[in-house]
Image (tube, rainbow, N blue to C red):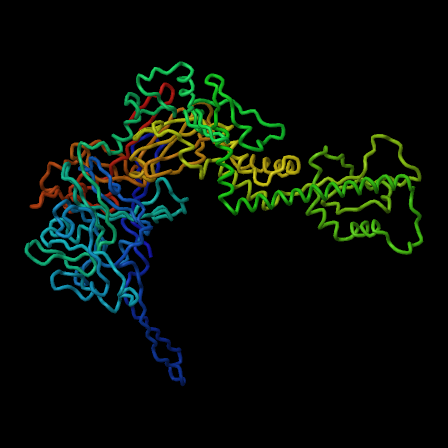
Amino acid sequence: MTTHPTEQSAPADDTPATSVTSVTFHDHLLPGIEAGRYRITVDQQLPAEHLPGARLDPVAQIVGVRASQFRLDPSWVHAVYPAAHSQGPFHGLLPHITLNPASLPWEREPFTGSIRNPARAPWTALLLFGEGELPGDPNALGATASVTVRALLDGDAAVSGPALDRDAVDPTLLDTPCRVVDVPQALLAQLLPEPSDLAFLAHVRSGGEDAAPADGQSSRPGRDARAVITTARFPDADRGRYVAHLVSLEGHTPPGPQAGGKPVRLVSLHSWTFTSCAASGDGFGRLAGRFAPGNGEHSAAPLRPAPAAGAGLPDELGTLLEQGMVPMTHITDSGERALAWYSGPFLPRVAPELPRPADGHFPDADGLLLHEPHTGTFATGYACAWNVGRALALADPGFATTLVRLRHQGRLRRATDRQYATYRRQLFHSSLSAGPAPRAAAPAAAPTPREQFEELLRGDALDALAASFATPDDSEPQPRTVSATPDEPEPHPQAVRATPTTYRLDAPPRSSAPQPEPQQQPPSLSPSPSPSPDAREAAAWLATLRTLSGVPFDYLVPDQRMLPPESLRLFHVDRGWLHALLDGARSLDRHPGADATTDAELDDLLDGQGPVPTAGLLLRSALVPGWPTLRFEAGAASGNAPVEVIRSEALGADVLLMLFDRMPDRLTISEPPQGLHFGVDEEGNVALRSLAPGEVGRPLGRSVPVGADPALTVTTPAGARVLNVGRLAARLAEDVKPGSPLSPAEFAVQLVRAPEQLTLSFEGTKGTTR
């Protein structure tokens, strides 16, 4: 069962409508039945009670509905903010966690059964602790204690644990460990809101970057819905490290204001740490703003090696560096060490076209060692690409086996085709010289081997032979095909007949004399086979390799100085490097003459495997781990078609690679709409947003001072800044919804802080931030 609260659709920001992504907020998503033990009683009675057997005894059955209680699957955590182990100015934001199971916070009841929960408060809460606040984790490193579920249920005299029904717990879980934290009762009373206010700290959100198609029920969360749980505590500007714990409130009683009681043992379902520092540059705005012009090596620029200052290099060497070439040590086959120049697939320029061999494919890496005339050395980039492709192909036994099998099948088809063509030519010429066969010929005493072969071809075996082996000779032009019409005479009895739906046969006319025309050709087959499964599989693997998947990073960026920390670099993709890479992968068991047909088949299939990367960018920044669903929008001034992203993948802890079908003219980097944050602005105010139908989320141009109002932001004796959630909800309702209280979804809309974004223009590398 799902509730249907008023839909709260809030745009991510106040950008033009063409770039707004709709995000929908819901109060909660209730499961059809809550976790617990239930008694099901079935009572059946027939209408005629006076008949024997009309009254049946009731049947009762005890069933248990189970849900997560002591542990949380790590894959259920979609995102946390601030990101784990991050450092930044987070003092104006409320940390939160986003969960994939949208109904998880409402699958159980918080506190004990004696506490009524009319507002549908969640059974989980997000608590934030600073350094020196938790006795078991004084440095806020996320340390927890591990106890078994049995020990948790049995209780500990030194702490106040949850009062849970042992019979309702799955017996198989009793000996499994769970993580717990012991929180001083006075501290918990300061940080945990009132039971009636907990509902405002959890909601369901759908839409955004990965929105599912609408199903026509706008008030019902979609398949992309996720639960969001927010803490009520603000990090301090210079407090240092914090640890956030998603804890279970099931089985507990609301903590009282008195101090000196036993510590409260809470089950920690998930935790992470971060550092709040006002002077840190790890916020999104500061991190992204570095890519704007004027920030030295951080500014967005082409990917090229930069010579050391004052190096005094000759002009020809500086030109090679500007073209993206890096000096490397080259070890020859004889063991000598020499200087060579290496260039990967990513260049700051459009590379000239690489001349191809006559058959279109390089047979080895030696043919790709190019001479660099200015320095008298070799350029080894293409040769390295060939070797990398071959190594990756050999490292994948599935692809290697498929490619070798495909080549053997092609050679078998070619050999069979040659033999069959020879036989057909002999048969054709013999039929022309022998004249028409008599209608009733006397049977031979014994069939000759050739007659047996002819009889085999006339039977069902021809279909199987044709479907498996009939392909045109790859060393000769395609034969001319002539189809017989109904007006033509019956073909010669010795001519081979084939299935008309698969092949068309040149049949010699019925004539008593041979035809002297020199242009007449022997009969031939004109096949139209479809690609084999092996060919499709090999082409798909090669198409993936064409996006440089699996290529070691050192071959993409040969010098780490080309991509310094906190930098964004643009590049063109060298098409010749990709060709060399694929030629190396396709070199397994390849014979240029015998495998021409197979190579042509793979080339045709590769042409239909989507666009080839032409340009891209590399981002090395703390934005990559801190914002896993970072949003990029690439555009081009020329043409109306958008720039297509062919590949977007994190290549390490802090490096992101994106490949495009063409070079973009502008790039917009923004926080993902699904990762909206909550809190106050730089002045400590909550910017009010409209809740009117059709205008939900539109800024109203006025705000409520929260940071400066002691009734709304309480400073606890421990020095924590905690929102008075109930009072803040009532205060916001007076401005945006007079006469009616706010729902959890409406409360979340008011606390939303719009994502920041950076727009870069690559015409002159102008950058703007917002």
* Percent position of residue 129, x then y: 16, 47
The image shows residue 685, relative to residue 137, as above or below, that is: above
The image shows residue 136, relative to residue 660, as above or below, that is: below
* Residue furthest top in the image: 315
* Percent position of residue 709, x then y: 10, 38
Question: Which quadrant of the figure contains the C terminus?
Answer: top left
Viewer-side residue, 671 vs 138 = 138
Viewer-side residue, 79 vs 343 = 343
* Residue furthest bottom in the image: 52
Q: Does 339 sit left or right of 497 as displayed? A: left
Q: Quadrant of residue 282?
A: top left
Q: Quadrant of residue 213?
A: top left
Viewer-side residue, 509 vs 701 = 509
Q: Does 194 sit left or right of 759 as displayed? A: left
- Say whether residue 374 is visible: yes
* Percent position of residue 543, x then y: 51, 38
- Say whether residue 3 is visible: no
